[in-house]
């Protein structure tokens, strides 16, 4: 089987287009440049499956109590989220309960290769750093207790153990576990820097949920957190929900440490609805709007996201996509010594995920076998309230400024992912204009005003003749200054406006709306398409009616606004940038730009006349006096003046040459 994709994420970097050849459940070859295969992905990218080293549960299933079909539901559900390998994680509990849970997990592992082993997060933890762990079941890591823990059922499956290294007997326990091939993570600890270094020397190689349940680092005492970030012998696991660790510290950790691993630390609430309530670790826990499980006293009891959501949150925090993906695939595989997982390379197991451009999984393959397609997920739109901003009005002004700037950056990132569609729209509109057609904008409210503004500004900037770019604003031009009640709902007005302007098959219309469902704009698209014209849509929500109606949809999925529903904010910014790029690139295609110069601008005031003079001097190399005379003789037309000076032509000859070369100064200068 050959799977082709526009991009491949190999485990450490993006490349593409390319294809992956799968034989016998493994990758037999990676073929760069191949764009068609037995399976051809139309967008997004193909990546190795995600690997989560800390899964306490999900979808209402707790790894500590799961049995039979519940394990199948958990493994299948995680696979649909792109997680093709995971460590079921058992928190502190009495030894008989741990042994029974391990036995049930072992039975599930025999059916599911995605279960990579067992992670015991306890019972060898520091009493003062327990988090959600029950203190009554804590034990010291003595040889006798370690032996009692390592029953045959546990030993057969055990892959990772979390230990507080300051406990008596911890160093010997670490060495004994490493001798059995079990990885050791340091966590739930108040260890000193010296105690952490001793644990590293004994063989510890990971840190469990860096920053959480451990003593903070200080200037002279880096402790577990500081050494987790800086020691070449430790791979720090970081909960990627943006709540257990603030987004700013996520960015710091993943930027500073090339070994940092993303984990979900998911509990059984992951994948359920906000407000869901279950028991975890012997006490009730509730799913908060931020996607975490909390105790009645507000204590964090684990995350309630799956790892694909963690990747999306890392990217939103400003972490490079290739870093976020590596932290959730190649790095955890490497930390466990699983060198045939987490990468796309010949010989690797064919655990693969098709991600769309928003990092949502669309399809997963386990050992080359396709799983069920990922279920459609409701994505937060521009009007979704952001629960984490419940105290926005109580925050300092500087913090509010930073929030807005972060949201604007996220919107521009989203615009970058929409660049291929925007380029197709540019080429389509340019073709219509070259053939004598016109460009129409249609929108209501902020979106309509942005279309009107872009149309007006193209006149002086590019010398566009009146009527070439026609803005249709719901409520008419007067709605630019004052909202017209009900105008955005008047689809008939849009149809009448197109009819009044004689819109035809030679024209193009671009509808603009953050929600993608504004009745006025949607009606304009429907009417324009019925008349045979080119239709494009610039929207900020996924799977909108406008995107479905338009021939070319530019979906800028900028996400929820800081102030819910106020789409004049980051959605409006992204639309303004998209319109700037659209009209400017179309004008470049029309020959109205030469290099970086707006050579068709109208020099209608002193500033613009000075700009015209500077352009002619730069492009002709003639003296300031000769340039001024040429501009005067050409009615301040930059392209004509440059041709007159460089080709020794009169004004009429220059105009004729430009007409014969479709207005392109570059082609006119090259003409024989």
Image (spheres, grey):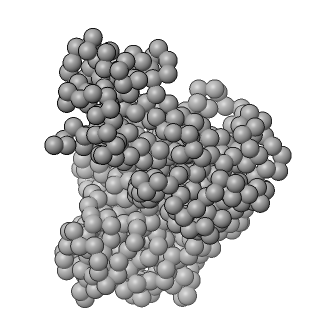
| Position of residue 11 measured from the top left corner of the image (x, y, whole percent) | 28, 62
* Identity of the residue furthest to the right in this view: 485
The residue that appears at 83% across and 46% down in the rendered structure is 485
The residue that appears at 46% across and 34% down in the rendered structure is 463
| Position of residue 533 measured from the top left corner of the image (x, y, whole percent) | 55, 63
Toward which corner of the image does residue 173 lie, by quadrant? bottom left
| Residue 564 visible from this viewpoint | no
Q: Is residue 397 left or right of residue 28?
A: right
Of residues 644 and 55, the one drawn nearer to the viewer in this rendering: 644
Q: Quadrant of the N terminus?
A: bottom left
Q: Is residue 34 left or right of residue 297?
A: left
In the image, residue 549 above or below residue 202: below
| Position of residue 263 measured from the top left corner of the image (x, y, whole percent) | 44, 59
* Identity of the residue furthest to the left in this view: 672
| Residue 66 visible from this viewpoint | yes
In the image, residue 615 above or below residue 540: above
Q: Is residue 353 left or right of residue 516?
A: left
Of residues 94 and 28, the one drawn nearer to the viewer in this rendering: 28
Q: Quadrant of the C terminus?
A: top left
Toward which corner of the image does residue 540 lie, by quadrant? bottom right
Of residues 200 and 484, the one drawn nearer to the viewer in this rendering: 484
In the image, residue 481 above or below residue 375: above
| Position of residue 383 measured from the top left corner of the image (x, y, whole percent) | 69, 52
Of residues 634 and 386, the one drawn nearer to the viewer in this rendering: 634
The residue that appears at 43% across and 56% down in the rendered structure is 435
The residue that appears at 29% across and 59% down in the rendered structure is 14
Tally of numbered discs: 0
């Amino acid at each position: 089987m050959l799977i082709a994709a526009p991009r491949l994420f190999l485990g450490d970097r993006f490349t593409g287009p390319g294809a992956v050849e799968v034989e016998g459940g493994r990758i037999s070859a990676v073929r760069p440049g191949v764009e068609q295969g037995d399976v051809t992905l139309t967008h997004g990218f193909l990546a190795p499956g995600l690997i989560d080293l800390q899964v306490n549960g999900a979808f209402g299933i707790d790894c500590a109590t799961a049995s039979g079909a519940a394990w199948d539901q958990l493994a299948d559900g995680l696979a649909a989220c792109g997680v093709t390998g995971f460590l079921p994680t058992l928190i502190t509990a009495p030894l008989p309960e741990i042994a029974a849970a391990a036995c049930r997990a072992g039975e599930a592992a025999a059916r599911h290769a995605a279960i990579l082993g067992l992670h015991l997060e306890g019972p060898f933890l520091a009493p003062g750093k327990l988090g959600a762990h029950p203190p009554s079941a804590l034990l010291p890591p003595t040889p006798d207790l370690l032996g009692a823990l390592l029953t045959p059922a546990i030993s057969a499956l055990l892959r990772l153990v979390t230990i507080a290294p300051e406990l008596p007997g911890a160093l010997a326990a670490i060495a004994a576990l490493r001798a059995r091939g079990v990885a050791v993570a340091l966590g739930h600890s108040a260890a000193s820097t010296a105690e952490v270094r001793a644990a590293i020397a004994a063989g510890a190689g990971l840190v469990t949920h860096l920053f959480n349940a451990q003593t903070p680092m200080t200037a002279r005492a880096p402790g577990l957190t500081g050494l987790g970030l800086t020691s070449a012998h430790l791979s720090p696991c970081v909960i990627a929900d943006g709540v257990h660790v603030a987004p700013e510290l996520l960015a710091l950790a993943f930027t500073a440490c090339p070994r940092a691993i993303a984990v979900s630390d998911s509990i059984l609430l992951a994948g359920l609805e906000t407000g869901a309530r279950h028991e975890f670790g012997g006490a009730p826990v509730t799913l908060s709007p931020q996607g975490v499980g909390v105790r009645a006293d507000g204590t964090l009891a684990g995350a309630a996201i799956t790892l694909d959501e963690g990747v999306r949150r890392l990217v939103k925090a400003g972490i490079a996509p290739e870093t976020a993906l590596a932290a959730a695939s190649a790095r955890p595989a490497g930390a466990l010594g699983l060198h045939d997982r987490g990468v796309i390379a010949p010989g690797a197991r064919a655990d693969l995920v098709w991600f769309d451009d928003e990092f949502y999984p669309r399809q997963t393959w386990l050992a080359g076998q396709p799983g069920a397609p990922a279920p459609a997920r409701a994505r937060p739109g521009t009007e979704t309230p952001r629960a984490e901003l419940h105290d926005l009005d109580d925050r300092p002004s500087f913090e509010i400024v930073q929030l807005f700037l972060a949201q604007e950056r996220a919107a521009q990132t989203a615009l970058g992912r929409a660049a291929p569609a925007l380029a197709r729209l540019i080429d389509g509109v340019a073709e219509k204009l070259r053939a004598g057609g016109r460009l129409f904008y249609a929108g209501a409210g902020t979106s309509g005003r942005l279309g009107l503004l872009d149309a007006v500004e193209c006149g002086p900037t590019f010398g566009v003749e009146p009527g070439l770019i026609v803005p249709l604003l719901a409520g008419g031009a007067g709605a630019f200054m004052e909202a017209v009640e009900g105008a955005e709902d008047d689809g008939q007005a849009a149809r009448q406006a197109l009819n009044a302007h004689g819109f035809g098959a030679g024209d193009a219309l671009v509808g603009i709306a953050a929600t993608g469902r504004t009745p006025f704009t949607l009606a304009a698209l429907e009417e324009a398409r019925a008349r045979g014209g080119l239709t494009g849509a610039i929207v900020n929500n996924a799977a909108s009616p406008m995107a479905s109606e338009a021939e070319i949809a530019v979906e800028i999925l900028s996400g929820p606004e800081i102030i819910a529903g106020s789409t004049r904010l980051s959605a409006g910014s992204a639309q303004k940038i998209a319109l700037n790029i659209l009209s400017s690139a179309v004008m470049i295609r029309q020959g109205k730009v030469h290099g970086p110069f707006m050579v068709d601008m109208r020099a209608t005031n002193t500033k613009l006349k000075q700009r015209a003079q500077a352009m002619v001097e730069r492009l002709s190399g003639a003296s300031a006096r000769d340039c001024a005379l040429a501009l005067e003789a050409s009615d301040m037309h930059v392209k004509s003046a440059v041709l007159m000076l460089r080709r020794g032509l009169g004004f009429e000859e220059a105009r004729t040459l430009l007409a014969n070369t479709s207005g392109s100064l570059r082609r006119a200068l090259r003409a024989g």
